[in-house]
Amino acid sequence: MSVARLPVIVGFGGFNAAGRASGHHAYRRMVIESLPDVARQETLAGLAVMMGLVSYVEGAYRDSADQTLGLADIEARYGEQILDGTLIRRIDKTFFDVDAAHWQKSATLGSGDAPLVFELRKRDLPEPVPSDWQVEDVDGDRVRVTAAAGLDVKFDSYRDIPVKSAGQLPRGFNPGALYNSHYHPRALQLAVIGASDAIQSIGIKWQTVMAAVQPDQVGVYASNVMSQMDENGFGGLLQSRLKGGRVSAKQCPLGLNTMPADFVNAYILGSVGQTGAITGACASFLYNLQAAADDITSGKCRVAVVGCAEAPIVLEIIDGYATMGALASEEKLKKLDGTEEADPRRTSRPFGENAGFTMAEASQYVVLMDDALAIELGADIHGAVGDVFINADGFKKSISAPGPGNYITMAKAVASAKAILGEEAVKQRSLIQAHGSSTPQNRVTESQIFDQVAQVFGIDNWPVSAVKAYVGHSLSAASGEQLIASLGVFKYGIIPGIKTIDKVADDVFADRLQISTKDVVASQPLDVAFLNSKGFGGNNATASIFAPHVVERMLTRRYGDKVITRYQDKREQVRAAAQAYDVAAQQGNFATIYHFGEGLIDESQIRLDQESVQLPGFAHPIDLTFTNRFADMCD
């Protein structure tokens, strides 16, 4: 019987409203009030550089006047501005003006029995000319038109948008400035910088990783839900004719929702291995994580890059979700709070009195290896993927309503973790990262699932966190944010509270749950986090993520003390390299990986026979010596 390989997490990165994910900095922004002074100031300094408030030059932080600043100086001078320019906040005008969003108002010119007469350039006449128009030349360039029935026109106009908040990247941070991103939609910019951040966080050069495996043993699993809907993607493609413009050659291919995987393969890794772009609405990250973990467990893949990148702060997308009643509008929040002015920072309120979710942009990527490869390379292990379960809802009345599938995924995940780690780990040392979308329906249905699972498995006072309270709902990337926040909890022991609510809503099933409005320091190290996700269409997924101390205990049992000691020695060098990248990124030197037109494979140099395919530039050949796995069915 073959031994199952454990998918361990050896790198993670990305960007969201809390900042940079690698080095736990985005997590640290969420619990910044609970951090020691140095950790808090380091995270604030990194954000200050990202936001363009300070720069790092010649070994020191400096302001615009070239004055040297220490960490404490940055906090004192810019701390409030940094906090205000991160997490959920009023939508910046760099996206659109929420008080005066552009639209076109229809009208008919001309009234009564009198025809409408106007002049225009001859070349501006529509094709064909309407049959009820009379056209006469004014001169060689202009014509006079008489329209008997008037003229339907559209005027540029502006109107208030009811939804005014979103989870946006730190104010002043431009993802496209980190590499040559000309004509790239914003979601693809996020994919490039997020995947690059994750790769560099490993602390092992990618060439070293590739030299240890066959070329086809690398996988990339990434996608997004809303595609690329800004001007450089499908948005510009669909709007071009209506605006009188032309479609570009890039808008159609770059708009595809496979691009968060394709760009990683083509421009970051140069991978020829397994690729997949799976979507499951808001559970998409976990769909991709399941595919990667299953391929690693089975031995099909030895290294996997998993992620999602979403940039949905686009007027049309906001309009769509708002029309569904899914988003927290300003008027709903005013009514809920009984105030004349809504707080743009507190629009997302999981498990509290709430009014809808808050849209967000984010890019979150993790790097997985099988346990044997991680041991061989000395990779730093931040956790492991236990299982990911996906189940649909069955027949539905409403495509957006929750259903029974999430009962199945949650119960399976807890039962699986119990089988692997034991009953006490689940009962005493586990955490839930809730979907926590901040809708009235979610707070009831999701908490009821948690309550029933807790009752069945004998869990009391089960800690529940919901990162959407901080960063909003980034759709496909949302569970990536849950996973990376969980890695932060494993390291620091601080469970982020739901600070945007005053109290848990009365209709929440909270008797067996610990839902706190402030950060909670765990009384003992947590062994496992359950990531729960619910998506439109009945897309439910729940994953179990094991803490690094649990993984090391498991690996010691598999490999023995001597092998683990040698591994730990190698790991010190890897940790030092990862720390060096973290320090450089804190200072604004992200060194984003982007290889455009570099390292192309010369197909004339490919060599193949019946046993292998050898590609130029790769250390190992691709094995073609297959056995018949259906031998019992064949002659």
Image (cartoon, rainbow, N blue to C red):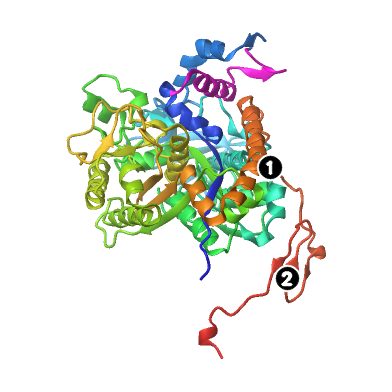
Q: Quadrant of the C terminus?
A: bottom right
Q: Position of residue 318 (x, y in %)?
A: 40, 38
- Residue 59 lies within the magenta run: yes
Q: Foreground residue, 61 or 234?
A: 61
* Residue 236, placed above or below residue 65: below
Find disc 2 in the rendering and name its residue.
612
- Badge 1 marks a residue whose secondary structure is loop
Residue 439 seen in this snapshot: yes
In the current view of this chain or complex, which residue is farthest to the right?
Answer: 605
Q: Which residues are magenta?
A: 35-63
- Badge 2 marks a residue whose secondary structure is strand
Q: Position of residue 353 (x, y in %)?
A: 23, 32
Task: Tell me the CA gap for discs 2 and 1.
Answer: 30 Å
Q: Quadrant of residue 411?
A: bottom left
* Residue 424, placed above or below residue 102: below
Amino acid type, residue under disc 2 in the picture? Ser
Q: Residue at x 68, y 50 (%)?
A: 209
Q: Foreground residue, 1 or 487?
A: 1
Left or right for 313, reference 606: left
Mark 1, other Cα within 10 Å: few <14 / some 14–19 / many ≥20: many
Find disc 1 in the rendering and name its residue.
594
* Residue 532, placed above or below residue 470: below
Q: Which sits earlier in the primary sequence, circle 2 or circle 1?
A: 1
Q: Position of residue 88 (x, y in %)?
A: 41, 28
**Rendered image: mark on residue 289:** none
Amino acid type, residue under disc 1 in the picture? Tyr
